[in-house]
Image (cartoon, rainbow, N blue to C red):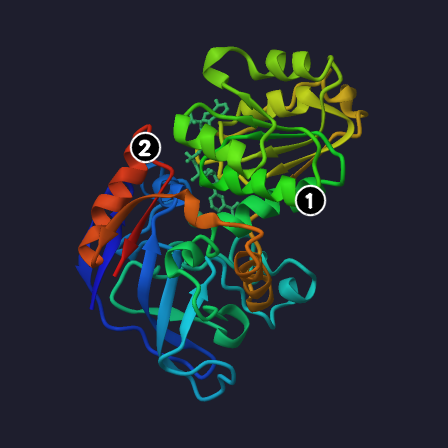
Amino acid sequence: MKGFAMLGIGKTGWINKERPQCGPLDAICRPIVLAPCTSDIHTVWEGAIGERTDMILGHESVAEVVEVGSCVKYFKPGDRVIVPAITPDWNSLEAQGGYQMHSGGMLAGWKFSNFKDGVFGEFFHVNDADGNLAILPEGMDPVAACMLADMVPTGFHGIELADVQFGDTVAVIGIGPVGLMSVAGAALRGASHIYAVGSRPNCVQLAKEYGATDIINYKEGDIVEQIMEKTGDKGVDKVIVAGGDNDTFAQAITILKPGGKIGNVNYLGEGDYIKIPRVEWGCGMGHKIIAGGLMPGGRLRMEKLASLISTKRLDPGKLVTHRFEGLEGIEPALMLMKEKPRDLIKPVVVI
Ligand code: NDP
Ligand code: ZN
């Protein structure tokens, strides 16, 4: 079968591989909708997780099940499913301990396009199918549902990590597709002020639609000064980091109130350290908590997030700005993600 792969750091191309084998708990799927992720860019062009050779890329998809293992109870060939980016081993000790995303070791629940071939092929393999797949609800647009694979659960996880409460003031640093879902998540969780930091006009427009009360353009001045001014020098209760670089933490800590929490979902692809400014961190005593995490996967979570689309509480389909057709659309969609033209939010490939 054909797949679009990372050939090595900085190199991509089409390769041919054997179709994956289906174990007793597994499923083999055929993609229906695919999306590239900024994480694929960190992985290939920054070598952020180290060298990988001939590894099929991609971890965001809606798919059709073509084969299931003998022990799979809830899925059968022909089912249309949402496939989360994170597919843990549900019987691992880490999953039992509440951290399914690290089943088998740190970040090891993230298997597609990290430890095994991803979804950018004619077929792909899903471990622990009963725990990891979710049925695409009848009538749901598979393009919008594809945003449930990664953008929605990651953006929302930033909100969970920062523990956003009713009436909180929240800064969301970065309003690409992930941060936009953090803006939507903050609004759903009852935040009062949502300060959305970004510059692309499309993203700014959508941030307002998803509930941002204030837009902070980091290209038009220091975000610390802008947010401190808007909050009367108090800062915010919670910060979600969904963009920026290693220096962004210094800004996030500075704008956070004592007792506040930072929820980082940004994939830090470069450098050895992040910056924590000593004085702004209360000389180590400021009760300013930094939490960072990989999105949780799982059937239950996917079904719950899908229900937000069904009940029209959330429309992640608005993130999609570019569409490609057929498997051959994967390469231009990925390149678009790499180049990030100003009118891009999220591309999809409809197979
Ligand atoms: P984008 O590149 O589309 O968005 C990044 C955002 O950050 C943009 O709004 C950009 O602004 C803004 N930004 C860039 N530089 C700065 C800066 N110096 N200060 C403030 N804001 C800045 O990324 P995605 O939304 O696709 O992904 C966000 C991150 O989440 C990525 O690192 C990705 O790898 C990661 N990720 C993490 C996952 C997880 O499980 N934790 C899963 C999926 C993705 P502008 O408007 O100017 O472009
Ligand atoms: Zn991703």
Rendered location of residue 206, percent (x, y): 47, 35
Farthest residue, direction bottom: 70
Q: Of the residues shown, which amino acid type is indicated by label 2? A: Lys
Horizontal arrangement in the rendering, residue 206 relative to residue 238 (left or right): left
Taking the image as drawn, is residue 292 in sight? Answer: no
The residue positioned 44% from the left and 52% from the top of the image is: 147
Q: Secondary structure at mark 2?
A: loop
Nearer the observer, 65 or 42: 65
Rendered location of residue 250, percent (x, y): 61, 21
Q: Which mark is residue 340?
A: 2
- Please identify the quarter of the rendering in which residue 212 is found: top right
* Disc 1 to disc 2, C-alpha distance: 30 Å
Q: Is residue 78 above or below residue 239?
A: below
Quadrant into which the C terminus falls: bottom left
The residue positioned 57% from the left and 59% from the top of the image is: 311
The residue mark sitting in front, 1 or 2, is: 1
- Please identify the quarter of the rendering in which residue 59 is found: bottom left
Rendered location of residue 263, percent (x, y): 64, 38
Query: Which numbered disc, 1 or 2, marks the residue that appears first in the sequence?
Result: 1
Q: How many marks?
A: 2
Q: Which residue is mark 1?
A: 189
Tell whether circle 2 marks a residue whose Cβ is less than 8 angstroms from ligand 1: yes
